Amino acid sequence: MCDFMKTTLLNILLIALITLASCQDRKNIVVTGQVIDETTGKSIPNAEVVVLCWYNHNIDDASFNKQTLTTDNEGKYQANFEKGHQVDVASKSTGYQPNRSYNELKDNKIEVNLKLTKKKENPDLVTLLNTDNVMLDLNENFPFIRVRIPGIKNGKGLDFKNAMTFGFDFKSLTTNSDTTQTDLWFRIVNKEEQPTKIATSVNGGLIPILDSEIKSSLLYEKTIAPTTGYVTTYKLTGSEAGFFVRCRDGKTYGKIILEKSAIDISSPDGQGSYYKEFGKNFSCLYQPNGTTDLTYSQTDVDLEDFLVDFRMR
């Protein structure tokens, strides 16, 4: 075996060992922390805290044990677990937005402190979240942007010449194949692959919000839309958590929170062939009153869902 192959195999083995070691369960886990007001720095007593401790269920699967706690008079909490390699913590309290934290265990003891931000009312905000049990109906009345490629009759491939793009309209919260009636859509690619270029009208625009900019949840962060810096075409890189959107009227603003997974659907068309769809699902927030305030004020979330459902990111 040549030196290059030996080096390559050793590197692969080293990476595998590091990965395995990083997921090894530690014993007698102790999780402590404090919940405080982000503005005043004061402790928040009687706050609800949910702690999930992930452990290796078997070689291919991980599961978690859960504890639901209430902070004491000093805003402190403590949870104990037999084993685990990651601890996820979320908290909420009356009058505050929830917060969450994801932590890989480097020791069997860990301190996770959470800062909660005061709730702000925003009654005019319109939302359509894909965690609201909204299902895709026959009218495609659901927040997404997609490209649909019809099949050639008798199953002889795809008809790229008649591909369609479905954009999203914030005002009506609907999708439409007429992009003049939508605020953002995918540019059609004449290939059987995911589209990556999002377009808007000349009066609208996009500003990306990157994963690295989000501390806890985009649903509750990035609450004020910028008024400048928008672009009418954007190419996805995979690092986007979502986008600020200036709508096609040039006056109203919204925000979308992308699902990490992409849509890749193949379905019969009822004519002996099939069509394919590629695209993205997302949640959306829209401010119809012309202000840039996109503050999400509903705070009574299920903390376990808040931790494990990444659509609420």
Image (cartoon, helix red, strand yellow):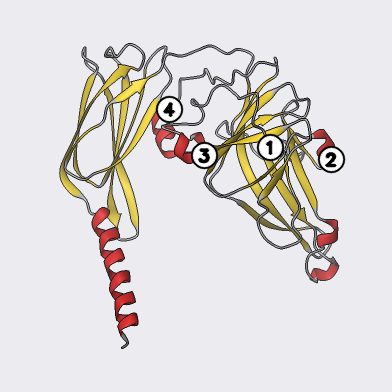
Instruction: Assign a secondary structure to mark 2.
Output: loop
Q: Is residue 61 left or right of residue 218?
A: left
Query: CB of mark 4 within 8 Å of CB of mark 2?
Result: no
Tally of numbered tags = 4
Does residue 78 show up?
yes
Question: Callout 1 environment at 10 Å: few (<14), some (14 to 19), or many (20+)?
Answer: some
**Residue 11 in picture, x, y percent from top left:** 30, 70
Name the kind of residue labelled 2 in the image.
Asp
Question: Callout 4 environment at 10 Å: few (<14), some (14 to 19), or many (20+)?
Answer: few
Q: CA distance from mark 1 to mark 2?
A: 21 Å
Q: Earlier in the sequence, mark 3 or mark 4?
A: 3
Q: CA distance from mark 1 to mark 4?
A: 36 Å
For disc 3, the marked residue is 210
Of tags 1 and 2, the one toward the viewer is: 1
Q: CA distance from mark 3 to mark 4?
A: 25 Å
Query: CB of mark 3 within 8 Å of CB of mark 4?
Result: no
Of tags 1 and 4, the one toward the viewer is: 1
For disc 1, the marked residue is 231
Instruction: Assign a secondary structure to mark 3.
Output: strand
**Residue 48 in picture, x, y percent from top left:** 32, 21
Name the kind of residue labelled 1 in the image.
Val
Of tags 3 and 4, the one toward the viewer is: 3
Q: CA distance from mark 3 to mark 2?
A: 29 Å
For disc 2, the marked residue is 178
